[in-house]
Amino acid sequence: MVLKAFFPTCCASADSGLLVGRWVPEQNSAVVLAVVHFPFIPIQVKELLAQVQQASRVGVTVLGTWCHRRQEPEESLGHFLEGLGAIFSHEPWLQLCRERGSKFWSCKATHRQVPTSPSAPGEDQVMLIFYDQRKVLLSQLHPPTALPDHQAGDATASTRGLAAVFDTVARSEALFRSDRFDEGLVRLSHWQSEGVEASILVELAKQASGPVCLLLAYLLSLISAASTCRVFKLWPLSFIWSKLSTCEQLRHRLEQLTFIFSTQKAENASQLMRKANMLVSVLLDVALGLTLLSWLHGKDRIGQLADALVPVADWVAEELQHLLQWLMGAPAGLKMNRALDQVLGRFFLYHIHLWISYIHLMSPFIERILWHMGLSACLGLTVALSILSDIIALLTFHIYCFYVYGARLYCLKICGLSSLWRLFRGKKWNVLRQRVDSCSYDLDQLFIGTLLFTVLVFLLPTTALYYLVFTLLRLLVVTVQGLIHLLVDLINSLPLYALGLRLCRPYRLSAGVKFQVLEHEAGRPLRLLMQINPLPYNRVVHTYRLPSCGCHPKHSWGSLCRKLFFGELIYPWRQRGDKQD
């Protein structure tokens, strides 16, 4: 039987002593965590291991002996190491030895108990696997991607074996708090052999984080209580708060800050990573917002934007007037219904006249409004982008009105034509059962239906042309707002902290390991080096992606084309009755 011994590379130059670690019987492997140096008292070693077991819930025990022959071997040391097996009873008993001034190692795993069958060997073959203890301690092992069925069993077995090794090192942190320079009764060697890592700044931040988080959590609770006031639940305010992108983004940021500054400790590594990703996302958002704020308030750029806004609005209104005058004539040589064409054209021209009057009425206050809105960039770039989306929606409200009028009129004619077409076929729509049933009509009903069908058919091209033009304008505005929402969702959901870890310390996010052969000679134990495979960037984004506010709909192409063909309204927000394909 082959026994796998995971040995830390930091203990390769340690003095002789005892191997302390965990035995994993399911995988027939031993995970060495530290080396206990001479001199020591066995009862003190047992007490230390009992304390570590109680703190970490890991079955840490003495696995065997370690001999580093820096000098000529002594008979007394050899007999002493062999005698330790009677004090620390472990089955099997590992004996690792490194030759002096040589790269060769000797590894044995002996069984002191009498074998049950005469053919059973008294020693096991040992496969020595070196691993970087610090990287394994700080890394988080992720499950592999889906494999074919014939590889699923092997992948599961290997994942469980690696998970046992990673979990053992991660949970044995209590053993790594002491090193060989401590004045304790037991001296150890592990990845912190040169002294326990510590930072004054980190310790001060830990001490100050508690009161700061408590204060911020209290302030955020007050803001949340104020936002749930009954005044904001009245009909006009509740409708506005649910439709504005700025309110959705502020509500999303409030939820994130409440989660970040919560005094409740993270339960696992995933929740801790989520907090870190949210904190970095908020800090980057605020930094970008402050940069935008400094750019807007420098060189009087807000005044320049305010001076350019009214001419741009006049230019858009003038172009719309030219477009309507073109539609009221013979657009592209098409012969339209003149009466309906004139009525629709004058109706829309009157709306443009009202909109121009409204813009000129608000022009003295535009610079002040932009100045106050620019201050909102200190809350983050996403808030400023959400305000920009709402401003675009308000400035293009006349285009939205044109689209709604055209869509409603077109939808009314489509519904009328479909109903009259069923009349010709002797069918009707059953409202109660939501299906098409057979029906018999008399002569008068068929005559009136024929007249109405003819009128609607001849008026449909004029209505469809107006609907097509204003739908294209509406889709242009929705596309611009969609790009802004896409940028906001990217800032909100991108796991920046996880990506930074993957870039700077790729071993922190591991997707498995790979083994490199160090020694493979006949009569010598096989020695391997375990290296960590970092998690790919696409899996990092997929695994740690943060939830976005999701205030806009996500229609499929089929659903969007169906809505456009039948004249159903397309809103920039999610409706309660929307069905996703």
Image (cartoon, grey):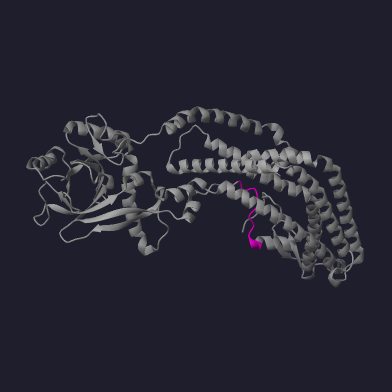
Q: Which residues are magenta?
A: 549-558
Residue 250 picture location, percent across and down: 64, 40
Residue 274 picture location, percent across and down: 49, 43
The residue nearer to you, when weighing 534 against 474, is 534
Residue 93 picture location, percent across and down: 16, 46
The residue nearer to you, when weighing 147 against 487, is 487
Whether the magenta-drawn stretch holds residue 557 is answered as yes
Q: Determine the residue positioned at 69% across, 32% down.
A: 230
The residue nearer to you, when weighing 534 against 117, is 534
Whether the magenta-drawn stretch holds residue 112 is answered as no
Q: Is residue 262 above or below residue 124?
A: above
Residue 445 picture location, percent across and down: 85, 66
- Quarter placement of the C terminus: bottom right
Can the viewer see residue 456? no
Q: Is residue 254 left or right of residue 361?
A: left
Q: Determine the residue positioned at 33% across, 38% down.
A: 173
